Image (cartoon, rainbow, N blue to C red):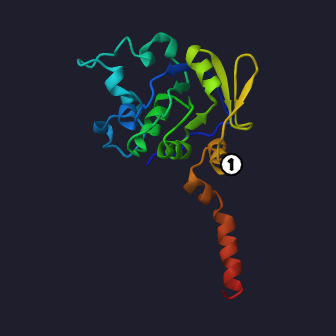
Amino acid sequence: MSAAPKGFEAVTSRTVVLPRTDIDTDQIIPARFLRTTTREGLGQQLFADWRYLADGSPNPDFVLNRPEAAGCRILVGGRNFGCGSSREHAPWALVDFGIQAVVSTEFADIFRANSLKNGLVPVIVDQATHAWLLANPGVEITVDLKTASVILPDGRSAPFPIDPFARYCLMQGVDQLGYLLSKNDEITAWEQRRAARGY
């Protein structure tokens, strides 16, 4: 399995908007691409059935193929993003493509949990903020993990919920196993003290 992405405290980027509701994990990464156990290269197949035409050429009408989408690291999606099956490859594909945060009003629970474990920030905003972002594609915003808020171009901020431990791991660039391994010396010392007491 590939290593966790590098940590970050905030991501500032123009947005790319995909306003469809109920985008499921099979649309994010079709099942035929699930044979890999690493994330490397999965970005090429992100939204494959929408990004490519039948002959394999890029679909010029799909938003991620447009010139203005180049370099965007924040995706604004419709409601109920990431529904469907629980494949971890969905956040892997988004991260490998270069997306660091997805903004919506609602995420499927399993997709949200998988994202937080794999370096992708699922940002739940209020309806008004979401509607504004959908209506203004390409604006530059900041997803700030330190304050757990989205900062809009006019300086307004919209808070979003995030588990403190998940936020710590994202900022440090570690997954749950990496966090435990970082505490190895402390765990070993505790075990030695416990053994010395005869427990």
Residue at point 50%, 27% (across, down):
78
Under mark 1, the amino acid is Pro
When the figure is inspected, residue 133 is found, relative to residue 27, above or below; the finding is above
Residue at point 48%, 42% (across, down):
111
When the figure is inspected, residue 133 is found, relative to residue 106, above or below; the finding is above
Query: Which residue occupies the foreground of this view, 135 or 51?
Result: 135
Q: Look at mark 1 in the image and give the residue it sits on.
A: 164
When the figure is inspected, residue 192 is found, relative to residue 35, above or below; the finding is below
When the figure is inspected, residue 43 is found, relative to residue 52, above or below; the finding is below
Residue 135: x and y in percent read: 57, 14
Q: Secondary structure at mark 1?
A: helix
Does residue 16 appear left or right of residue 160 in this picture?
left
Residue 59: x and y in percent read: 34, 15
Q: Residues within 10 Å of mark 1 (few under 14, many from 20)?
A: few
Residue 186: x and y in percent read: 69, 66
Does residue 153 appear left or right of residue 17 in this picture?
right
Would residue 182 be seen by someone viewing this image from the given angle?
yes
Residue at point 55%, 56% (across, down):
177
Would residue 137 be seen by someone viewing this image from the given angle?
no
Query: Which residue occupies the foreground of this view, 192 or 91?
Result: 91
Identity of the residue furthest to the front in this view:
127
